[in-house]
Image (tube, rainbow, N blue to C red):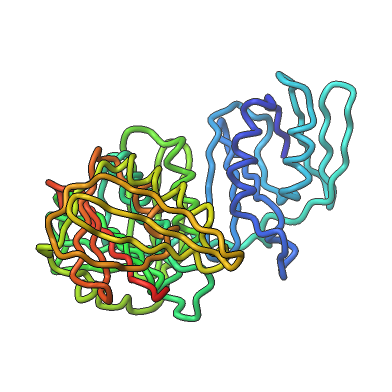
Amino acid sequence: MKIKISREMLLPVLQAANNVVERRQTLPILSNLLFQVEGPRITVTATDMEVELVCEIEHQAGSDGAVALPARKLLDICRALPAEAELTIEAGTGKAKIASGRSRFSLASMKADEFPSIGSFEVGIEFELPKEMLTDLIESTHFAMAHQDVRYYLNGLLFEMDNNRLRAVATDGHRLALTDKTLELDVDGVRQLIVPRKGVLEIARLLNGAGDTVTISIGENHLRVSGGAQSLTTKLVDGRFPDYERVIPPESPNSLIADRELLRAGLSRASILSNEKFRGIRLILKNDLLVAVAHNPEQEEAEEEIEVTYAGEQMEVGFNVSYLLDVLGVMRSESVRIDLIDANSSCLLRMPEDASSRYVVMPMRL
């Protein structure tokens, strides 16, 4: 196998593929990238056995063949070469030679037939959707996914679909994010699937370089997202997502409407003096006024008065301020509505005139 290619054409592919490769691998082959050359197409594949990324380069490469090359070293070499450099990669037995200008490198290579694949599965559902729709679903919810939780089904993003709706839901047990999009689908009943955390983050990266639409293919245990010259296949989490509907509080007469950016800025300032570990903040609600108060173990205190529209009961309620700031950071509306039942109940955040995105944050005792 022989490849002649420019640095600018190869570098973005190596960067995308290295995101999938795990630094610490139990199988040496998994620290490699699979290069396959067939006619005018170069295919680069990376996998960690849970997620597989395939990148295609349309380029008259040289001679056909396949080889597995060290992912990190190849990326470092490509980065270190000057702009507009031309590379020649030639695979031999157990070694691959890389030449560019006056630079020469000899890398250990592995046989292509040793490289594992998770990419083939029987497709049950397949549909196209606008890239912006999938991007919005992920960006507006993924921050609420759990991280290394023993409840492994929370370490991912739930996609729920029926004939006219695609929904994304994430929760870590302390907060919940939900977004709905209207989309005509050919699905029997309601279908749920949980995409693992790493798969979600890699799909978000893939969408940055995708075209206007992407194709989603769903099998029994796999999901593939294809867009542009890349396709990402991820195993699905084998578990049952909790009944999230019952933790979404109803609308309440104790609801406030605030300017989203003013509220975000005020809470952000108050959070500077909150407890660094627990991030607690106390919200005091009065007639058309919200007072945010934060304390820390050094007996320091911050207080912010924020004008809001509120005519409900006077109450005090504590929250993790980071959870509130995460929600206000992903919302795109000018104002935000917050429904509160009492000091011991979760609050519901959403846009005032649109319930397609809803966010639930549990209270905390301060």
The one nearer the camera, 185 or 106, is 185
x and y percentages locating residue 159 in the rendered image: 30, 62
- Residue at coordinates 40% horizontally, 40% vertically from top-left? 227
Quadrant that contains the N terminus = top right
Q: At which x and y percent is residue 198? A: 51, 59
Give the residue displayed 50% in from the left and 58% down from the top: 301
- Seen in the image, is 101 located left or right of residue 129? right
Report the front residue among 158 and 147: 147
The residue at 23%/42% (across/down) is 335
Residue 263 shown left or right of residue 296 in the figure: left
Q: Nearer the viewer, residue 167 or 265?
A: 265
For the view shown, which residue lies furthest in the left direction? 253
Judge whether residue 263 can be spotted in this image.
yes
Question: At 39% across and 46% down in the image, what residue appears?
Answer: 266
Q: Is residue 24 above or below residue 59?
A: below
Q: Quadrant of the C terminus?
A: bottom left
Quadrant hosting residue 281: bottom left
**In x, y percent, where is residue 276?**
57, 62
Q: Inspect this view and state whether residue 356 appears.
A: no
Image coordinates of residue 236 in percent, x first then y, are 41, 68
Judge from the rendering whether residue 166 lies leftward or rightward of residue 270; answer left or right.
left
Decide: is 148 above or below 117: below
